[in-house]
Amino acid sequence: MKNLIKAEFFRLSKSQSFWLLLILALVLGISYGISSLTGYEICIVKLSPELFTAIWICLFAVSFICCEFHDRTFGRSIFSITTRQKIFLAKALVFFTGALPIMLLPAIVSTIIATTRNGFGQVWNAMLVSVIIQRLISYIFWGFFMDSCALLMAALIRDRVGTFGAGVVFMYVMMSLEADGIGVGNSFGSILVVYLIKIVIIMAIATLIFVKRDLK
């Protein structure tokens, strides 16, 4: 498993699409920061669930996951001693890791630029730090939830175009349910627990599909 994870991180470091998405995320962060909003306002806005962020996650899934179905890399891996489950989980771990800077970079860069231009807009204190940290952690957990949705669509459909289209629709539905208050707790802790349960369930389904489905 350790060697599999190392191999996946190496593939990630050599992925041109990953670096392209990072560059585009940086450019978006710069464009967001050039506004009349303060650093705090930008921070709160950008650390909120957005369909546009989900679309970026889908693009990353298509380039990092579906390309291996297309190139038969997954299929060749089946002939090694390692099980399909370990192969998929290693890929998923690196995918989650790679998606994190893609979704966080616009928020970080735009907050820095807006603060430099217009000030932060808030007096720093323990309560403010707590609000920002909770917002950041909630956003990360939401991102992991979107990652698991993208992985499920990739394992189920495997085709690049189909995965992207179905992934965006599936994520939109999940976000709409959350907007209606379905499955979302009132407290910070309960929100994280609900997200964690969703992630575990979706990842279990995605792994089962990958393990059971013929890759040849």
Image (cartoon, rainbow, N blue to C red):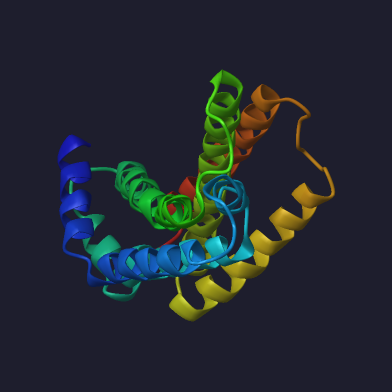
* Relative vertical location of residue 138 with respect to residue 75 in this rendering, above or below: above
Q: Nearer the viewer, residue 157 or 122?
A: 122
Which quadrant of the figure contains the C terminus?
bottom left
Which quadrant of the figure contains the N terminus?
top left
Question: Residue lying furthest right in this view?
Answer: 180
Which residue does the image show at 58% across and 44% down from the upper left?
A: 142
The answer to whether residue 4 is visible is yes
- Res. 54 image quadrant: bottom right
* Relative vertical location of residue 103 with respect to residue 56 in this rendering, above or below: above
Which residue does the image show at 44% across and 58% down from the upper left?
A: 106
Horizontal side of 126 relative to 74 (left or right) equals right
* Relative vertical location of residue 130 with respect to residue 50 in this rendering, above or below: above
Looking at the picture, how far across and down is residue 40, in whole percent?
57, 44
Looking at the picture, how far across and down is residue 48, in whole percent?
62, 50
Question: Residue lying furthest bottom in this view?
Answer: 161
Horizontal side of 185 relative to 4 (left or right) equals right
Which residue does the image show at 52% across and 73% down from the upper left?
A: 164
Looking at the picture, how far across and down is residue 117, in whole percent?
45, 57
Number of disc labels: 0
Question: Residue lying furthest top in this view?
Answer: 126
Looking at the picture, how far across and down is residue 126, in whole percent?
55, 19
The answer to whether residue 216 is visible is no
Q: Nearer the viewer, residue 34 or 199?
A: 34
Q: Nearer the viewer, residue 39 or 196?
A: 39
